[in-house]
Amino acid sequence: MDARSEALARLTRLGALPAANGRKPDHVDIHRVRGAVGLRRFVAGLLGRRPGWLRLLYRARAVLARLLGLQQAGGAPADVGPDDVPMTPGERLSVFTVVAADADSHWVAEGADKHLRAVLAVLVTPEQDGRNRFDVVTVVEYLHWTGPVYFNLIRPFHHLVVWRLARTAARG
């Protein structure tokens, strides 16, 4: 089974996919990294860093969001430490609401606006060398005509942001 199918199967077992009306997701991507950190530290590094290049991208995103009439035109997330990562369904981190979490295996959260619903998942698999494999999965479902317009404009930046932040988070 390839990484994408494996990740989707795990998310399905957790009941964490936005599969409204039985539709397949409109977009799925996975970024795989390895590191000697735990899940909470990884999520904090992924969502709680604000390097200058990311703040600049969030400013550009805010302009696009306003043009499309989207609600979440906010800036980059605030600094977050491992102890700040919520693990209880219903708790929030940045624009995401936790759907399911287990400190040893996964952290799944959802963010939604009128244009799309996105699931961000971090799936952890311990490796024999004592490190962890982190699969950072993004699942997107379009809810409005502005969904594909918005997401296709930000998609190249999405991949860059997730990849860079995941690599940095894996280093701790």
Image (cartoon, rainbow, N blue to C red):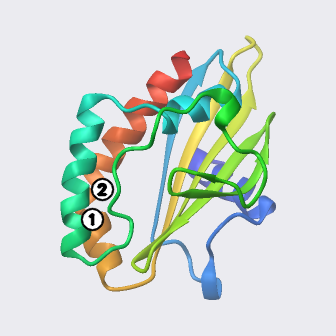
- Name the residue type under label 1: Asn
Q: Residues within 10 Å of mark 2 (few under 14, many from 20)?
A: few
Residue drawn at point x = 25 percent, y = 59 percent: 62
Instruction: Please tell me whether residue 35 is drawn above or below residue 158 in the rendered image.
Output: above
Residue drawn at point x = 80 percent, y = 61 percent: 13
Name the residue nearer the viewer: 46 or 84.
Answer: 84
Question: Are circles 1 and 2 on residues that touch, CB within 8 Å?
Answer: yes
To which residue does mark 2 refer? 155
Residue 119 in picture, x, y percent from top left: 57, 60
Instruction: Please tell me whether residue 8 is drawn above or below residue 161 in the rendered image.
Output: below
Image quarter of residue 23:
bottom right
Name the residue nearer the viewer: 128 or 50.
Answer: 50
Name the residue nearer the viewer: 153 or 83.
Answer: 83
Instruction: Please tell me whether residue 142 is drawn above or below residue 17 in the rendered image.
Output: below
Q: Residues within 10 Å of mark 1 (few under 14, many from 20)?
A: few
View extreme (bottom): residue: 21
Residue drawn at point x = 33 percent, y = 74 percent: 70
> On residue 80, which mark appears?
none
To which residue does mark 1 refer? 152
Residue 116 in picture, x, y percent from top left: 44, 74
Q: Distance of mark 1 from mark 2, alpha carbons?
A: 5 Å
Q: Secondary structure at mark 2?
A: helix
Classify the position of the C terminus by image quarter.
Answer: top right
- Name the residue type under label 2: Arg
